[in-house]
Image (tube, rainbow, N blue to C red):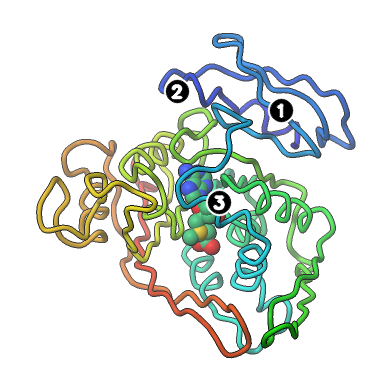
């Protein structure tokens, strides 16, 4: 974990109160803490840094719950790597989703946060635009792989071609992309371990329908966003009780607190309806991005992710 992010960290277990974490570095290489501990003076919890990865979960040793175990499987990792980096591996069948999302990022943000970053493509795009960019995810395997790509600037992975035959992909980051001011941590987007109003650009892509408490996720994203921030939100609204109890869905039902379509409800919440998300955001753009995922040579999934580009850049 890069030492530069330490001043922004708070204890995820003590939220909604914010208490700083104290860093003890046992092994460090050029400002990167390879082994150490982050501790909270208030609750005395300790969060480990192992192999350079900070695990900032209230219970760092708990096993994945709900549908989260799927993301730890090797096949899922390769599938995400393809969806994030197939274009950088020169695959003519790669989709353009991440270029489309990256095109919606604000210019000149100093600090950026990518919630549920998976293998990190949008975090790299944020860092390439000059921001101190942080990606967080619950999946240790995704975070380890994203850190490895940031360090080595190249990565090889394979996916099934057909049956036991495999296709190999060699990803190289473009030379112009900066990787010195970025970091990936294991953290929960329902308890984001960062000080309020840290980030000038935030993003939540294909995540709100994956969390246990979608409204708490939006609330947390708003807490860590600066008063004058930009927020990139996109989601297919594939509500499922495997991830989220039905009473917590922000759409996809006829009754309850959030009936109707998810995108309408998230838009209204961001615009200040109910006074939960404050100060309100202005929606600058609403649209859709087609996100492509490959399982084998002849099998792809095409997902319509509904996009909201929100900003408070003109407010103080
Ligand atoms: C559908 S994937 C989307 C990944 C990425 N944002 C993208 O659009 O390519 C959802 C991701 O969110 C992560 N995730 C799910 N629940 C989470 C939580 N509570 N905190 C952090 N990450 C979470 C998963 O591990 C997975 O990487």
- In this rendering, the answer to whether 39 lies above or below 274 is above
* Label 3 crowd (10 A; few <14 / some 14-19 / many >=20): few
**Residue of label 1:** 48
Q: Secondary structure at mark 3?
A: helix
* Discs 1/2, front: 1
Q: Specify which label sits upstream in the sequence, 1 or 2.
A: 2
Residue in view at x 62 percent, y 45 percent:
134
* Discs 3/2, front: 3
Residue 299, percent across and down? Answer: 54, 85
Q: Quadrant of the N terminus?
A: top right
Q: Is residue 144 left or right of residue 274?
A: right
Residue in view at x 67 percent, y 49 percent:
143
Q: Specify which label sits upstream in the sequence, 3 or 2.
A: 2
Residue in view at x 16 percent, y 39 percent:
274
In this rendered view, identify the residue nearer to me: 118 or 233. 118
**Residue of label 3:** 69
* Discs 3/1, front: 3
Q: Specify which label sits upstream in the sequence, 3 or 1.
A: 1
Does any portion of residue 116 appear in the rendered image? no
* Label 2 crowd (10 A; few <14 / some 14-19 / many >=20): some
Whether label 3 touches label 2, CB < 8 Å: no
Residue 155, percent across and down? Answer: 80, 66
Q: Quadrant of the C terminus?
A: top left
Residue 230, percent across and down? Answer: 43, 50
Name the quadrant containing residue 177: bottom right
Q: CA distance from mark 3 to mark 2?
A: 25 Å
Residue in view at x 22 percent, y 56 percent:
251
The CB of the residue at mark 2 lies under 8 Å from ligand 1: no
Q: Secondary structure at mark 1?
A: strand
Q: Is residue 34 left or right of residue 272?
A: right
Residue 4, percent across and down? Answer: 72, 33
Q: Is residue 136 left or right of residue 241?
A: right
């Amino acid at each position: 974990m890069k030492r530069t992010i330490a001043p922004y960290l708070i204890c995820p277990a003590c939220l909604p109160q914010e208490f700083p974490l104290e860093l003890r570095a046992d092994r460090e290489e050029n400002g990167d803490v390879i082994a150490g501990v982050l501790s909270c003076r208030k609750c005395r919890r300790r969060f480990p840094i192992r192999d350079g990865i900070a695990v900032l979960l209230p219970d760092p040793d708990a096993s994945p719950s709900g549908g989260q175990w799927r993301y730890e499987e090797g096949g899922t990792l390769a599938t995400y790597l393809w969806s994030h980096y197939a274009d950088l591996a020169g695959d003519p069948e790669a989709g353009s989703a991440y270029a489309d999302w990256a095109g919606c990022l604000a210019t000149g943000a100093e600090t950026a946060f990518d919630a549920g970053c998976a293998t990190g493509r949008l975090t790299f795009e944020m860092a390439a635009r000059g921001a101190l960019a942080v990606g967080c995810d619950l999946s240790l395997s995704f975070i380890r792989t994203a850190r490895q790509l940031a360090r080595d600037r190249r990565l090889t992975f394979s996916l099934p071609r057909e049956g036991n035959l495999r296709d190999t992909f060699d990803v190289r980051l473009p030379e112009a992309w900066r990787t010195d001011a970025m970091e990936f941590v294991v953290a929960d987007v329902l308890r984001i371990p960062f000080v309020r109003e840290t980030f000038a650009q935030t993003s939540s892509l294909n995540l709100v329908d994956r969390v246990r408490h979608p409204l708490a996720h939006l609330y947390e994203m708003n807490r860590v966003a600066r008063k004058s921030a930009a927020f990139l939100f996109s989601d297919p609204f594939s509500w499922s009780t495997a991830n989220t109890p039905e009473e917590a869905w922000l759409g996809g039902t006829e009754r309850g607190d959030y009936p109707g379509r998810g995108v309408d409800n998230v838009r209204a919440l961001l615009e200040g309806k109910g006074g939960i998300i404050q100060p309100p955001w202005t929606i600058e753009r609403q649209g859709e991005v087609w996100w492509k995922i490959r399982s084998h040579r002849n099998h792809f999934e095409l997902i319509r992710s509904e996009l909201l580009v929100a900003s408070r850049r003109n407010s103080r």
